[in-house]
Image (cartoon, rainbow, N blue to C red):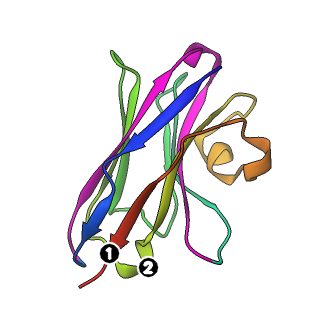
Amino acid sequence: QLQLVESGGGLVQPGGSLRLSCEPSGFSAEYYFIGWFRQAPGKEREGVACISSATGFRYHADSVKGRFTISRDNAKRTVFLQMNSLNPEDTAVYYCAARRGVSTAQAMCLTRSENIGSWGQGTQVTVSS
C-alpha cells in the first residue's frame, strides 16, 4: 500500500517561508493525484494545493494562491509545497494525500477526507511572532 511521509514543518514568523516535502513509497503509480491538505484546531480539513500526475495541471486554493506553490520531483516522486508570505491563519497541521478516480487537480483538493485512502502523518506549521 502507498505510504506518504511529510517533513519540513516548523515555527516561522509572519512573512516567512517554509517548504514541505511529501515522500511516497509503495504503489505510487496507482495514484493520479497528490495533494496537500491542512487542518487547524476545531476546523475542517481543507485542500490547499493539488497536482495531477497525468497532466501536470495544478490547483491552489484561493486562500493560498500567489503564496504557495505545489511541485513534483518526477525522478523521486517527491511532492513539495513551497509556502511564502506565511500568515498566522496558515497555522495548521499539513498533510499530503493521494487518490485516483478524480478528473482534475481541483476535484482532488475538493475531495472529502473520508474519500481519500492514503494520508501522511502530518507536519505542524506554526506562524507566530
Residue at (32% x, 63% y) in the render: 67
Question: Viewer-proximal residue, 114 or 49?
Answer: 114
Q: Label 1 sits on what residue type?
A: Val
Disc 1 element: strand
Q: Is residue 88 left or right of residue 13?
A: right
Q: Label 2 sits on what residue type?
A: Glu
Question: Viewer-proximal residue, 116 or 70?
Answer: 116
Between discs 1 and 2, the one toward the N terminus: 2
Task: Check the picture and name the quadrant holding the C terminus.
Answer: bottom left
Task: Check the picture and name the quadrant holding the N terminus.
Answer: top right
Q: Name, please, the residue furthest toward the bottom.
A: 129
**Residue extent of the magenta highlight:** 15-41
Local crowd at mark 2 within 10 Å, few (<14), some, or many (≥20)? few
Question: Viewer-proximal residue, 89 or 126?
Answer: 126
Give the residue at mark 2. Answer: 89
Give the residue at mark 1. Answer: 127
Q: Is residue 111 on the magenta stretch? A: no
Instruction: Return the x and y of residue 119 as percentages of the image width and height.
Output: 61, 40
State whether residue 99 is above or below residue 50. above
Residue at (58% x, 75% y) in the render: 41
